[in-house]
């Protein structure tokens, strides 16, 4: 079981560490609003990763097929959300940590978690990746409950570990970066997120 937990951990860590719009989003949030905001944003992603890992590991073929079959609507929805998010970041790129820190509220922290959870859930490529992993590890309808549960726990821990590492590292650099550098990161993040959203929509129709 420990081997399966480790493999799940490594998978969750690797999937979370893959470059993508959520990386830029969590990085920017940490730099602007602090470690807690970045952590909760990352935990939203880890929750979605664990959810998709559970679907794949427990062999829920009907749900997996439904998600895969609805790839285009999910891609369009997620891509549109990324474009809007990128545009908002570009409009707010002049913000600095000192200007945004007072805005942290319980509602804002909840939104940090829910928004990244929703953005990750709308990415159908995630469930396909975890379905391939479950097949590789030999998990499925005959695996019982223990092995899939261990795998899902490993994925959750691995993904959460990556986002903790990112939040801690980014927050440690937060006080050393000048407002100009942070604005540059915000601009780059906004452009990257919007472009990735456009690519997601384009790929769904190609």
Image (cartoon, rainbow, N blue to C red):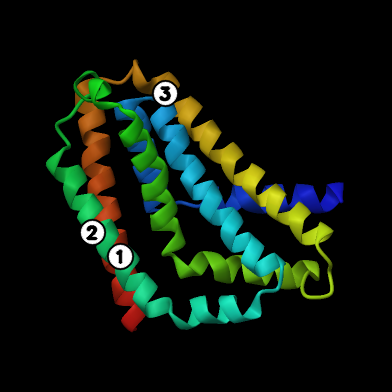
Residue for badge 3: 171
Say which residue appears at 43% left-offset and 80% top-offset: 70
Location of the C terminus by quadrant is bottom left
Q: Is residue 161 above or below residue 31?
A: below
Give the SS element for disc 1: helix
The residue located at (35%, 77%) in the rendering is 73
Counting other residues with Cα less than 10 Å from the Cα at mark 2, is it few (<14), some (14-19), or many (20 or more)?
many
Q: CA distance from mark 1 to mark 3?
A: 28 Å
Task: Mark 3 or mark 2: name the one nearer the start of the chain.
Answer: 2
Q: Is residue 102 above or below residue 132?
A: above
Residue 45 at x, y = what percent?
A: 49, 49
Position of 55 with respect to 203 (left or right) is: right
Q: Mark 3 packing: few (<14 Cα in 10 Å), some, or many (20+)?
A: many
Q: Quadrant of residue 111?
A: top left
Residue lying farthest right? 1
Secondary structure beneath disc 3?
helix
Among the 4 quarters of the image, the one containing residue 80: bottom left
Few, some or many C-alpha atoms within 10 Å of disc 1 (few <14, some 14-19, many ≥20)? Answer: many
Q: Secondary structure at mark 2?
A: helix
Residue hosting label 2: 83
Q: Position of residue 139 (x, y in %)?
A: 78, 69
Left or right: residue 21 compared with residue 140: left
Q: Can you identify the residue that label 1 sits on?
A: 79
Find residue 135 and name its label: none
Q: How many marks?
A: 3
Q: Residue at x 19, y 26 (%)?
A: 180
Q: CA distance from mark 3 to mark 2?
A: 26 Å
Which residue occupies the foreground of this view, 91 or 117?
117
Q: Are marks 1 and 3 in contact (CB under 8 Å)?
A: no
Q: CA distance from mark 2 to mark 1?
A: 6 Å
Q: Are marks 2 and 1 in contact (CB under 8 Å)?
A: yes
Residues marked 3 and 2 touching at CB (< 8 Å): no
């Amino acid at each position: 079981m420990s081997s399966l937990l480790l493999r799940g951990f490594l998978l969750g860590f690797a999937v979370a560490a893959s470059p993508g719009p959520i990386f830029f989003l969590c990085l920017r949030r940490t730099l602007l609003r602090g470690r807690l905001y970045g952590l909760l944003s990352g935990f939203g992603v880890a929750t979605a990763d664990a959810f998709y890992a559970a679907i794949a590991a427990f062999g829920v073929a009907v749900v997996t097929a439904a998600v895969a079959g609805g790839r285009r609507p999910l891609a369009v929805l997620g891509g549109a959300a990324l474009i809007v998010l990128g545009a908002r970041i570009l409009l707010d790129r002049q913000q600095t940590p000192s200007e945004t820190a007072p805005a942290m509220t319980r509602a804002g922290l909840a939104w940090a978690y829910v928004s990244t959870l929703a953005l990750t859930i709308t990415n159908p490529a995630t469930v396909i990746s975890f379905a391939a992993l479950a097949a590789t590890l030999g998990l499925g309808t005959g695996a019982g409950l223990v092995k899939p549960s261990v795998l899902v726990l490993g994925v959750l821990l691995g993904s959460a570990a990556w986002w903790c590492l990112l939040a801690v590292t980014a927050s440690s650099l937060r006080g050393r970066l000048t407002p100009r550098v942070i604005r540059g990161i915000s601009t780059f993040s906004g452009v990257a997120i919007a472009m990735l959203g456009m690519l997601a929509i384009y790929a769904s129709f190609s």
